[in-house]
Image: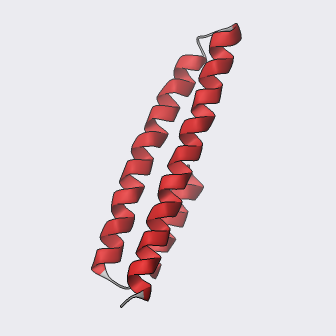
Amino acid sequence: MIAAALASALALAACDSQQAQNVENAADNQADAIDNQADALEQAADNMTGAAAANAENQVDVLEDRADAVRNAGDEKADAIDANK
């Protein structure tokens, strides 16, 4: 997660326009919320056993993938905004 935050900070520095920064910030905020859900589920999974624990860990993976997808989509939208200026 630290690497994602660092990547987000570097990506923000690459944005030329305020509009692009706003798009990227919104995506990062949404992705952070999803990451927080994944973290909470992962902590809960620590107290589970068997199939319940395995299912929870699978859901953590899904949430983490979703957070990455949201960040990437935000980056692409911000890049498109800057490319059109």
Task: Please say if 8 is above or below 79.
Answer: above
Location of the C terminus by quadrant is bottom left
User: At which x and y percent is residue 81?
Assistant: 38, 80
Left or right: where 73 falls relative to 3? left
Q: Can residue 23 be seen in this view?
A: yes
Task: Please say if 20 is above or below 8.
Answer: below
Q: Is residue 9 visible?
A: no
Left or right: where 20 falls relative to 79? left
User: At which x and y percent is residue 78?
Assistant: 41, 74
User: At which x and y percent is residue 84?
Assistant: 39, 88
Q: How many marks?
A: 0
Task: Please say if 34 is above or below 10.
Answer: above
Left or right: where 17 falls relative to 47? left
Query: Residue 55: which quarter of the image?
Result: top right
Residue for point 61% across, 10% down: 48
Left or right: where 7 falls relative to 26? right
User: At which x and y percent is residue 11?
Assistant: 49, 72
Residue for point 39% across, 42% down: 33
Question: Which residue is at the far bottom?
Answer: 85
Q: Nearer the viewer, residue 42 or 61?
A: 61
Residue for point 54% across, 65% down: 7
Task: Please say if 9 is above or below 83.
Answer: above
What's the colour scheme?
A: secondary structure
Query: Residue 18: which quarter of the image?
Result: bottom left
Q: Nearer the viewer, residue 61 or 7?
A: 61
Residue for point 59% across, 57% down: 3
Q: Nearer the viewer, residue 27 or 5?
A: 27
Question: Which residue is at the far top?
Answer: 49
Q: Nearer the viewer, residue 18 or 82?
A: 82
